[in-house]
């Protein structure tokens, strides 16, 4: 998967903004490795463009690199003197170049530019207000640190009214990733998707010419592989001391999902744990979730959003020394038994994506307002329970779904259990959807007919 794939909607949006001919300021953000730079390279390939990628270095060096980049642009306004190493002169040159013809300016790795110059966002906003806004410049500001992009652009008051669009680049869905791996079976593609979280960079590391087992051994269980150290590398880019962040992620990956549980597992006060969780959310690694039918803040749980990180923190830290020693087959024998448990949650994510996609395409019985999941207390069984897939439309319609990742056909007990849980809600009309990796027994199919339930076979 080395070629450029997908991102049709994002490319169309960028092209439409470029075609406007007037000043545009676009903030492009998304977590590390999601493919922002690849998208930009495709977008600017046929444009009149100045592309500058900031470096993790001093302000004077970044300025020097920017000057070189602008000097290399083949068009020079008539009567211009050679550029000097001042931001004012560099941006004034860009302003003159964009007064009479369309010009695209891309500033990539923005977190490094503001990291070396704390006043850069204010400076750019001032230039937009005083100069750029009346010309033909399109500026795209892109960065891979979600925390910095929010603090410096999206949440920064100086950019209010200056930016004209913002695009968050998300990981590929399962159905997008599936199109790129036709050589794998559908089951193997699902596992590959779970291992990579739909991140293009990680998808590129998977080899369609070998088995899933060998892909895991060659990447996660290989001390010389980039994926073996990827989560720790990611965190070191965001924070000075990743030790507690690693511990928090490990606690979540192994089952803790409430603030108090995570804090106890890590050995932190809940207030300190809250701060770490807040930062991990800003990095795009952790999500704070509420049952789809509840108001925000009720029954809050925390989960690792990226399934690659979920896999890594569940399986790798405890066996890192064994991996360094080269005892790969021993580790695989242990981990292989837990892959189905890991995939159960991934399969639930995939099935929610299926519902969301069909809902967007108006292929569901009604147009649902929201798609998510639910968890809570069952007053009848006196136990905590959950429903992996829940969607609703007003107070009248709701969808309840479950997803079974098993290598044997799903029986009627799974459907009966789903139907019972759906009765915890008082929606007049309820739609039942049962998803299965390996099909359904005849008894389950007969019960589905009687209940009017939908059975969806994973293919």
Image (cartoon, grey):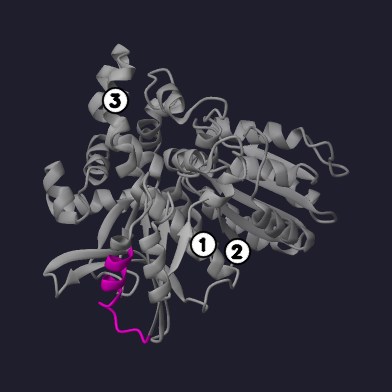
Q: Earlier in the sequence, mark 3 or mark 1?
A: 1
Dot in front, 3 or 1: 3
Q: Secondary structure at mark 2?
A: loop
CA distance separating discs 3 and 1: 55 Å
* Residue 422 image point, x, y percent: 30, 74
Image position of 359 with respect to 353: above or below: below
Q: Quadrant of residue 377?
A: bottom left
* Residue 372 image point, x, y percent: 39, 66
Q: Which residues are magenta?
A: 415-428
Callout 1 crowding tier (Cα within 10 Å): few <14, some 14–19, many ≥20: some
CA distance separating discs 2 and 1: 8 Å
Q: Quadrant of residue 93?
A: top right
Taking the magenta stretch, the answer to whether it contains residue 82 is: no
In the picture, the quarter occupied by the N terminus is top right
Taking the magenta stretch, the answer to whether it contains residue 423 is: yes
Dot in front, 2 or 3: 3
Which residue carries the number 2 mark?
A: 162
Callout 3 crowding tier (Cα within 10 Å): few <14, some 14–19, many ≥20: few
Image position of 246 with respect to 96: above or below: above
Q: Secondary structure at mark 3?
A: helix
**Left or right: 332 as drawn, with respect to 49:** left
Q: Mark number for residue 158?
A: 1
* Residue 367 image point, x, y percent: 52, 78
* Contact flag, marks 2 and 1 (Cβ < 8 Å): yes
Q: Earlier in the sequence, mark 2 or mark 3?
A: 2
């Amino acid at each position: 998967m080395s070629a450029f794939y997908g991102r049709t909607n994002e490319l169309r949006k960028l092209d439409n903004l470029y075609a406007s001919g007037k000043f545009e300021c676009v903030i492009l953000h998304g977590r590390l490795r999601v493919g922002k730079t690849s998208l930009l390279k495709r977008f600017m390939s046929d444009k009149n463009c100045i592309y500058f990628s900031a470096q993790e270095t001093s302000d004077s060096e970044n300025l020097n690199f920017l000057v070189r980049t602008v000097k290399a642009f083949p068009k020079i306004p008539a009567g211009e003197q050679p550029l000097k190493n001042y931001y004012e002169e560099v941006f004034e040159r860009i302003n003159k170049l964009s007064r009479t013809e369309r010009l695209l300016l891309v500033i990539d790795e923005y977190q490094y530019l503001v990291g070396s110059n704390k006043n850069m966002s204010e400076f750019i906003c001032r230039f937009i207000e005083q100069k750029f806004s009346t010309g033909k410049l399109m500026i795209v500001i892109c960065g891979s640190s979600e925390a910095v992009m929010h603090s410096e652009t999206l949440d920064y008051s100086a950019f209010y009214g200056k930016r004209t669009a913002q695009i968050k680049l998300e990981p590929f869905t399962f159905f997008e990733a599936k199109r790129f791996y036709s050589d794998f079976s559908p089951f193997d593609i699902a596992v590959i998707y779970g291992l990579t979280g739909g991140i293009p960079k990680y998808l590129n590391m998977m080899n369609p010419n070998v088995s899933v087992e060998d892909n895991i051994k060659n990447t996660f269980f290989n001390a010389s592989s980039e994926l073996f150290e990827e989560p720790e590398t990611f965190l070191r880019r965001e924070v000075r001391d990743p030790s507690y962040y690693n511990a928090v992620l490990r606690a979540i990956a192994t089952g803790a999902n409430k603030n108090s549980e995570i804090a106890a597992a890590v050995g932190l006060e809940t207030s300190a744990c809250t701060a770490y969780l807040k930062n991990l959310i800003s990095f795009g690694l952790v999500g704070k979730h509420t049952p789809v039918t509840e108001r925000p803040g009720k029954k809050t749980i925390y989960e690792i959003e990226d399934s690659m990180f979920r896999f890594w923190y569940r399986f790798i830290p405890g066996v890192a020394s064994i991996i360094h020693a080269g005892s790969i087959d021993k580790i695989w024998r242990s981990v292989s038994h837990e892959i189905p448990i890991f995939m159960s949650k991934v399969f639930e994510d995939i099935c929610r994506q299926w519902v969301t996609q069909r809902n967007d395409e108006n292929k569901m019985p009604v147009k649902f307002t929201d798609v998510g999941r639910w968890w809570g207390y069952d007053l009848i069984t006196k136990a905590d329970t959950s429903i992996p897939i829940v969607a609703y439309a007003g107070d009248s319609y709701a969808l309840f779904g479950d997803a079974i990742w098993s290598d044997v056909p799903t029986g009627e007990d799974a459907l009966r259990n789903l139907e019972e849980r759906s009765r915890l809600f008082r929606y007049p009309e309820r739609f039942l959807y049962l998803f299965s990796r390996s099909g359904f027994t005849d008894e389950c199919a007969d019960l589905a007919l009687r209940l009017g339930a939908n059975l969806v076979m994973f293919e």
